[in-house]
Image: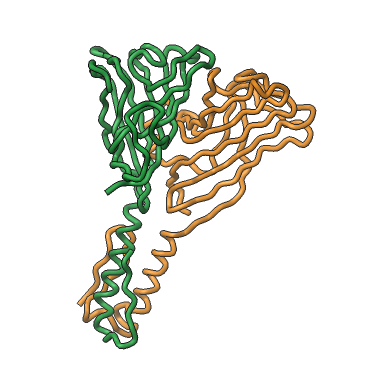
Chain colours: A green, B orange
Amino acid sequence: MTLISPITSDPVRNWVAMNNNNCDEIDAVIGPNTVQSYVPGFMGTGSTQPNLGNTGTITGVFYVQFETVFTWGFFRFGGSGINMGNGSFNITLPFICDASMQEDPDSGHGAIIGNAVCRDESSTANRQTCVVQLTGGNVVIFDLQAGGASSRAAGGAGGGRPFAWADGDAIHWAASYKIGV
Amino acid sequence: MGTTTTPNLGLIKPDLLESIKPNGPMPGWAAQNALNMNAIDSAFHRDDDTWNPAWTGDVSNPSLGTGGFVQGRWFRVYRKMVIAWFRIYTGSSGFSAGSGTYRLDLPFTMAAAVDAIAAGLEIPIGRAYLRDDSSVIGSEIASVCYAPDTNNLFLRTESGSWAPTAPFTITNEDRVTGYFIYPTDIAP
């Protein structure tokens, strides 16, 4: 914040402009005290793009304080026309990440900024946790853990990983990071 | 002559004619400044405390053994965010596991906007470590998930939801510790 502190010789009338500046600076840094909604983008890294289906949903919310954004969201496949694609799922965050954060398009290479759950609606045994990884700008993938109870495959969650995505299946995530300019 | 206010905190900005008035029919600088200081102080307010999260089972509740505990600590930053830690020790003897999916309470109610997007589902808001004292190789890292249908937490493990026999049979000397971060609408 660029706050103005008057000096002894300042005329009193200068206080008005100084106060205006200081109030606006402080107010802008604090920002609105609300959780706001946004619609994340959804795409894949493969040659065949995924499709959530005609009743599929994707939604996100975020809360900003200073340069940090906290965000939560989910997508869920639904209805007809579902296609899980043949690459890793990508979703977009509400803001681009600060350039100092380590971004990389490959699974396991970029910075981890949150947690996620792959939810197989028809099989609780198939549900598994994963992490949210930055791939670049405001795009992330969901890195899976190998092994576990169902001999799961590592890599980015997507077509066939960690299960065949169908009606009702979903990924839920929570992440936080520094906003870029 | 008059004042304007900032959009978020409502900080008062008097114009030239309003700026330096004695207290009278309209509030002068002293009153305006006091309001501004309070608004700024509230925005940067922080708080922290301990709490004892209720540890329950969907069918019957676990019962701690000798020396067992369920402890929690939370810290609030900014105006909505809650960062919380918890740890559980089942006790040295006499622990009873209860039955059904295990759940833990939040220190503050989840913000309505986040609760709304996850209806019937789950939001992974933290991580936990479940330590099997008798067989460390059976220990596991899990996601701390918020369940909107019950307004509390459960742990997503590689063997399903955390329960008396998942990911291992919980007994005396076992421990669970974790953290989570989430927003609340409860005023600090």
Quarter residue B90 falls in: top right
Give the quarter of the figure containing the N terminus of chain A: bottom left
Quarter residue B53 falls in: top right
Residue located at (43% from left, 49% from top)? B80
Quarter residue A19 falls in: bottom left
Observer-nearest residue: B31 or B90? B90
Residue A130 percent location from the top left of the image: 45, 26
Q: Is residue B152 left or right of residue A109?
A: right
Residue located at (22% from left, 74% from top)? B2
Residue A127 percent location from the top left of the image: 46, 18
User: Does B1 appear above or below A144?
Assistant: below
Residue located at (42% from left, 67% from top)? B38
Outermost bottom residue: A9
User: Does A27 appear above or below B95?
Assistant: below
Residue A60 percent location from the top left of the image: 32, 34
Q: Is residue A62 left or right of residue B100?
A: left
Observer-nearest residue: B39 or A17? A17
Total tally of numbered discs in the picture:
0
Observer-nearest residue: A104 or A120? A104
